[in-house]
């Protein structure tokens, strides 16, 4: 009997341990970041490694377990994909960022390690890695994200008819994902087109927009963040580069900042005011869109977009949602209007763009002259003044140089005026 009791106790302990491991895996977020620029036989690229390192640092600051590989030869790249597949097993989120040459050759989309070899007539490449291997490395993660800042410049500078034949860019990116997974693919440019590497020493247009949106929209649903990234690239390049965003199994219901995922789930459960997309009739989405407008909240509009992502009204709903979410609620406006306008607190020291942004509303005229980086600092200094911890290393470094910054909370409360100003700054950032 004592033996049986001991065995039963051991079984309970083991079950608890296994349950803990399973729970830990369910919350695990992993990222594979690859940057390749020092090509031996293709045109060299100035920025992929620095782009990848910046992306890796930003993801690590947001709680991702990051696996980094720079300028690998083919064997090392294949090993990296195999190792990541093991790490991504049962992860809640698996993300891959690839920066470097990529192309379509003989019907296959391929990545180019630094030892890739090419010929011109016909255009062929040896020692490449099929992009299917990259998709396979996502394993069985429930939420899968692929960010491809590839197809940069012309990989065949020594060949005639540059960028016009096979080898100009990825075509028809797709993966047959498992039935219980959600996959989103963000390609830096349209199918068959080339993406810019950017000026030497800078980031590529796609990496620049992506890193900016990581900071500005890390708390937004991932699809929304990537849509805004695509819009930023299109605008900054004058329409010469247009990213392509596609999903399989629906966009992952996640955001980059770990603390916001619970909020997304809450918003989804509270979005039952939107008629479900069940019948698929043309009138259904129009009625749902009108219902969302009638409700008027950003949550209702975002729920419509989630329910009818391919609808004619989806882009309109996204724009309305962006404006609605950026605007203060009626309750906050009323609270801000009756809130006593105290004199600005003193003793904060230097480092503030708006030292009194907790006591008065900022105006558009004050925000318009600021650069994108200044707007980012102005928005985050409101949180920093209230003691917020920052995962982003650049923000942490910036505010830590000032004695007034005393972090004590991941989510410090803001008064109505501060909430108003955060949203006003976000709205100005969306105009850029």
Image (spheres, grey):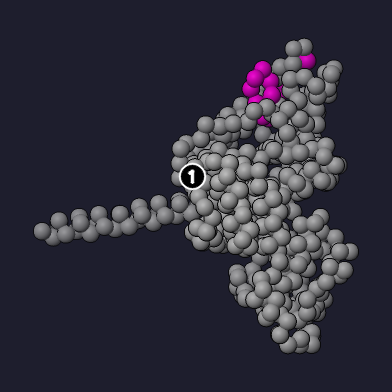
Which residue is located at x 71 percent, y 85 percent?
338
User: Residue 153: x and y, percent?
Assistant: 80, 31
Determine which residue is flagged by label 1.
Answer: 278
User: Residue 54: x and y, percent?
Assistant: 72, 50
Which residue is located at x 63 percent, y 38 percent?
246
Q: Is residue 366 magenta?
A: no
Quarter of image, res 391: bottom right
In-image side of 114 versus 174 (left or right): right
Please name whichever residue, 154 or 79, is drawn nearer the observer in this view of the structure: 154
User: Residue 327: x and y, percent?
Assistant: 71, 66
User: Residue 161: x and y, percent?
Assistant: 84, 18
Please name whichever residue, 324 or 430, is drawn nearer the observer in this view of the structure: 324
Q: Is residue 58 above or below residue 127?
A: below
Quarter of image, res 403: bottom right
Quarter of image, res 17: bottom left
Which residue is located at x 86 percent, y 64 percent?
368
Q: Secondary structure at mark 1?
A: loop
In-image side of 176 versus 297 (left or right): left
Q: Is residue 400 visible?
A: no
Please name whichever residue, 366 or 310, is drawn nearer the observer in this view of the structure: 310
Q: Is residue 312 above or below residue 428?
A: above
Q: Is residue 326 visible?
A: yes
Residue found at the very far top of the displayed protein: 121
Number of marks drawn: 1
What's drawn in magenta, residue-wise?
104-120
Which residue is located at x 50 percent, y 50 percent?
276
In-image side of 362 versus 369 (left or right): left
- Say few, some or many: other residues with alpha carbon within 10 Å of mark 1 (under 14 / 14 to 19 / 20 or more): few
Work out which quarter of the rendered image holds the C terminus and state it. bottom right
């Amino acid at each position: 009997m004592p033996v049986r009791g001991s065995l039963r106790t051991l079984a309970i302990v083991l079950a608890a341990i296994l349950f803990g491991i399973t729970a830990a895996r369910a919350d695990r977020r992993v990222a594979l970041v690859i940057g390749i620029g020092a090509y031996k036989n293709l045109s060299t690229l100035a920025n992929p490694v620095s782009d990848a390192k910046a992306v890796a640092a930003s993801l690590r600051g947001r709680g991702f377990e990051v696996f980094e590989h720079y300028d690998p030869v083919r064997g090392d790249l294949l090993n990296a994909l195999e190792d990541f597949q093991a790490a991504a097993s049962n992860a809640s989120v698996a993300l891959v960022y690839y920066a470097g040459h990529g192309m379509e050759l003989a019907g296959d989309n391929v990545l180019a390690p630094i030892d890739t070899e090419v010929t011109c007539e016909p255009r062929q490449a040896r020692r490449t890695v099929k992009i299917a291997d990259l998709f396979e490395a996502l394993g069985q993660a429930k939420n899968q994200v692929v960010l491809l800042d590839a197809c940069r410049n012309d990989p065949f500078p020594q060949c005639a008819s540059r960028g016009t034949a096979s080898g100009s860019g990825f075509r028809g990116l797709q993966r047959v994902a498992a039935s219980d997974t959600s996959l989103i693919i963000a390609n830096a440019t349209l199918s068959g087109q080339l993406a810019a590497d950017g000026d030497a020493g800078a980031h590529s247009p796609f990496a620049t927009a992506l890193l900016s949106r990581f900071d500005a929209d890390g708390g937004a649903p991932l699809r929304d963040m990537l849509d805004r990234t695509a819009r930023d690239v299109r605008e900054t390049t004058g329409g010469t580069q247009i990213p392509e965003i596609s999903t399989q199994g629906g966009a992952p219901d996640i955001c980059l900042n770990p603390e916001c995922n619970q909020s997304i789930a809450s918003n989804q459960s509270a979005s039952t005011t939107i008629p479900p997309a069940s019948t698929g009739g043309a009138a259904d989405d129009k009625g749902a869109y009108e219902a969302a407008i009638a409700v008027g909240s950003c949550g209702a509009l975002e729920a419509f977009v989630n329910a009818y992502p391919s609808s004619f009204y989806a882009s309109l709903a996204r724009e309305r949602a962006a404006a609605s979410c950026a605007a203060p609620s009626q309750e906050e406006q009323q609270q801000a209007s009756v809130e006593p306008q105290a004199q600005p607190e003193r003793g904060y020291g230097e480092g503030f763009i708006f030292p009194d942004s907790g006591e008065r509303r900022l105006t558009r005229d004050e925000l318009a002259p600021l650069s994108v980086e200044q707007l980012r600092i102005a928005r985050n200094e409101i949180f920093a003044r209230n003691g917020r911890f920052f995962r982003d290393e650049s923000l942490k470094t910036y505010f830590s140089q000032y004695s007034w910054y005393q972090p004590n909370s991941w989510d410090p409360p803001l008064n109505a005026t501060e909430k108003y100003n955060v949203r006003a700054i976000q709205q100005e950032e969306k105009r850029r």
